[in-house]
Amino acid sequence: MPATRRPRAWIGSLLVAVLAIQVLVRPGLAQDAKGSGDAASRAEAPISFRMDVAPILVANCVGCHSENRPGKARGKLDLTTFAKLMQGTPEEKVIAPGNPGESHLVLRIKGDEEPRMPQGGNNAGLAEAAIARIERWVKAGALLDPGLDPKSPIAGYAASPEQLRRDELARMDPRERDARVEAAGRSRWKQANPGLKPEAATGEYVALLGTLPADRAAAAVKAVDAQQAHLKRLLGPAGVDWPEKIGLYVFNDRKDFVEFVRTVENREIESDVVSTGNLRVAHPYVAVIDPLGGRKEEPVTARRGRPRGKRADDRDVASDRTLGGLLTEALGDASVAARGKSPRWLAAGTGAFLASQLEPRSPYYQRLRAAALAKYRKGWTTPTAEVLDEGDQATEADTRAIGFALVEAIQRTPAMRGSFPAFAEGMAKGKDKLADTLRDVFQLSREEFLGMTGDWVGRTYGGIQ
């Protein structure tokens, strides 16, 4: 059917497209809209309805063009399934396989027919890369991926933004991936202190930015890289399935760290917080305050657990920690927090336990154990239940101490240790799933779990005071 410029009833309005560009296109980052250097090579890859077209329709079109929508589908066009998309409206088809110039859906999103779609807001329409992918799919025959049911809801199999991002990263040269991680880190760093120029140190799994002596930066990267296997053992393969290297941002003073949290994370932090992290975002990261403030040598821990040459009463808040230990704790914490609805106590406890294996003599872990033992001696069940339920009385300090004790108790109990990955996976469904997860994984009730861990804390921590 020849293209026209007159309005058609089948597409009166579309859901306003306000989503990020990564939802709209594959591979999906903002460079696509600007015409990135590798666009030509991606264009040569086979086109996929599930990966290239379905995410665009779900994000921008299905909300209005659905029979399930109150008032029925706009313009009598239902886009909820592939079969209905190809069927078009009662008056006409909207896709002409092999011929984008005769496909009204393509003409509308390009603005060659009025009104241009999607409508709403400033009517900016789709990104050029998204339009190009739909047009290329139509030109290639408008086919559905093998194995998919044309009558199944498109939303059920459309690639998610995370899948699209992973797909892009998998296509990249590793050097380009590393360059993006470093560029994102420098951009974030600049928000905290534009005057500082951090140096990069890259490992197998992480990339550090900071103004540290080169040998300390390299040692920290090596130490954190080595924790990959331990974190995988704790959380299972899914817990370390990172699509790109984790950025490690090390600030020499608290002022820059606080400013980083304010500008990048848009929040304020308590005075004793020395680390943060977010693995849910593109270019995931953890950020910490260097325990030595950028000085040359890492503290050497004496047998009694404190740095040689420094008294216990004149240390900074983190000076009895190693940089590797602090980064490891932040990474373990963020790895759990990034999984579904994992509770705070599990994230904090896992991070602290993981780091305790790297710096076992640090007094930091003795303080956590002492805090947990104090709760036990005052009555373990009540304060622990407050932390597990994330009640108003649970402070961050209590959450970390009790979380560490619970994770350590599980890890030091042979019959439970091997099931920790399954426990972490179950708890990713939310704190209210604790009873079900305890029953399914450990065959324990909540009361039995509290009793067992309380006895372990009293027996084990009480004996090392």
Image (tube, helix red, strand yellow):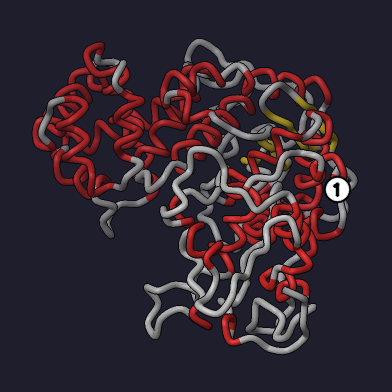
Which residue appears at 14% of the width and 32% of the height? 439
Measured as percent of width and height from the top left, residue 186 is found at: 81, 47
Which residue appears at 85% of the width and 59% of the height? 34
Viewer-nearest residue: 10 or 160:
10
User: Quarter-wise, where is residue 110 in the image?
Assistant: bottom right
Quadrant that contains the C terminus: top left
Viewer-nearest residue: 195 or 421:
421
Question: With 134 as the anchor, is 399 left or right in this view?
Answer: left
Which residue appears at 74% of the width and 69% of the height? 102
Question: With 234 as the anchor, is 262 left or right in this view?
Answer: right
- Number of numbered discs: 1
Task: Using the image, determine if residue 389 lies above or below residue 456.
Answer: below
Quadrant that contains the N terminus: bottom right
Task: Using the image, determine if residue 278 lies above or below residue 265.
Answer: above
Question: With 283 as the anchor, is 379 left or right in this view?
Answer: left
Measured as percent of width and height from the top left, residue 134 is found at: 70, 58
The residue wearing badge 1 is 196
Q: Is residue 278 visible?
A: no
Mark 1 Cα shell of 10 Å, populated few (<14), some (14-19), many (≥20): few
Which residue appears at 54% of the width and 38% of the height? 146
Task: Using the image, determine if residue 281 lies above or below residue 209.
Answer: below
User: Quarter-wise, where is residue 444 in the image?
Assistant: top left
Measured as percent of width and height from the top left, residue 40 is found at: 87, 44
Residue type (three-letter) at the residue carrying disc 1: Leu
Viewer-nearest residue: 306 or 176:
176
